[in-house]
Image (tube, rainbow, N blue to C red):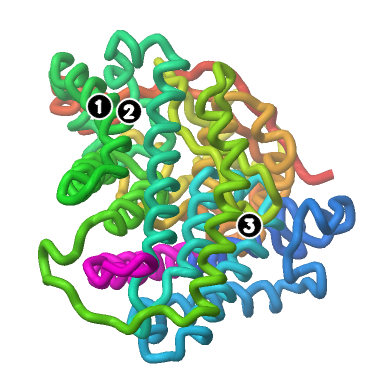
Amino acid sequence: MEWFGDDAYWLSRLVFQRALAAVYLVAFLAAALQFRALIGERGMLPVPAFLRRVPWRNSPTVFRLHYSDRFFALVAWTGCLLSAALVAGAADRLPLGVAMAWWAVLWLLYLSIVNVGQTWYGFGWESLLLETGFLAVFLGNENVQPPVLVLWLLRWLLFRVEFGAGLIKLRGDACWRDLTCLYFHHETQPMPGPLSRLFHRLPRPAHRVEAAANHVVQLGVPVLLFTPQPVASVAAALIVVTQLWLVLSGNFAWLNWLTIVLALSAVDGSLVAGEHPLPSAALWYQIVVIAVTALVLVLSYRPARNLLSKRQAMNRSYDSLHLVNSYGAFGTVGRIRQELVVEGTDETTIHEGTVWREYEFKGKPGDVRRLPRQYAPYHLRLDWMMWFAALSPVYARSWFLPFVERLLEGDRDTLRLLRGNPFQDAPPVHVRARLYHYRFTTRRERRETGARWHRTFVREFLAPTRLS
């Protein structure tokens, strides 16, 4: 190993870059397919209105130069094409500077989308993708040895993701300290997957082992990432196994997959495929990497201080470029699951016998008989925000009424976000929303009714509403 590069990580870098490009591809695809209804010119939270009220320094984006739905689509589909080419290894066939510029363009395009995404893009994995993507710009390609400094920055990022999530749990809900949170989590998580009911039905001692193992992997194992090989590789492998467990038990967009990608960068590839001699880095490249390392270390002060704070914050960005951020998840776990059910009717007068037809969403629970589907790493943004809205109307204040208005108009872009449209001939006259308590059925209930969920009416969320 030279002071700057290490041939032992050539395979780790190759796998990391291909996998990161795949995550980018999913993120850009989700943006391309969902943006019109969410943030388009006629969306629930239109980008042009957002740009008029937010100063450029708070939200740097290429859309400051021009915005139209056609231009946004061009940006998103360009991101898809660039990502797909990187998955195929295009960057390794280019000069180092061109490859770095390619990764930089990808990062800039996604930053531009996140910075106008508003509520729909307020998730921690958006910042995680941007921070990872920024570091990937300086990781090089097959024309140069993997830079050790950038590899260490990736481990520092992975450490903050895991250790931050572990600390927020210990400092948060008491059920993490008494190892009972997983009595509830698989049932109350934002978007259950097809196996979530089976995970929920595990014996309670198994749930306690799950919780204890979570603490070990998130609080102890990340420290080992900074130890010599092969210990660091073993630590990375344990993180990968834990993340795959989370992939099987729920739908968390690309959070788990991106964490796996980060862990792969810490694996010593020579343990599998031996070393692969590569050219040493040019002086200009070494200077750039050293400068970026210094920048990241300086910007790490506030995220590091946040880790040590008793008032630790989850998923916080400290600059509008999302360069170095704080992470965390599930500091609090809900004990009951509440779901919003949106219904419409074509009757002009509401009465006791009015027939209401339910709108089904693609991912979130609705029909009690339907098996939840596995959507991750794809991100169903509307479904996720419906989960937040059920927790508190505050989360729905900016977008829920515009959503209902578009249902009453029969807006095609909005309806494409849903599993189906119960009003094929004409839009409904009235739409309402009701809050229900959902729980997984017992084995006996499942045999007798065929239902996977049992639901109980709680209260009205939105009274029957029509277009004025």
The answer to whether mark 1 and mark 2 are in CB contact below 8 A is yes
Q: Is residue 1 above or below residue 167?
A: below
Q: Dot 3: what SS?
A: helix
Residue 359 in sight in this render? no
Q: Residues within 10 Å of mark 2 (few under 14, many from 20)?
A: some
Q: Which residues are magenta?
A: 1-27
What's the CA distance linking mark 1 and mark 3? 33 Å
> Residue 3 magenta-drawn?
yes
Which label sits on residue 261?
none
The answer to whether mark 2 and mark 3 are in CB contact below 8 A is no
Disc 2 target residue: 219
What's the CA distance linking mark 1 and mark 2? 5 Å
Foreground: 187 or 227? 227
**For marks 2 and 3 on the same chain, the one whose residue lies earlier in the sequence:** 3
Disc 3 target residue: 114
- Three-letter code, disc 3: Val
**For marks 1 and 3 on the same chain, the one whose residue lies earlier in the sequence:** 3
Disc 1 target residue: 216
Front: mark 2 or 3: 2
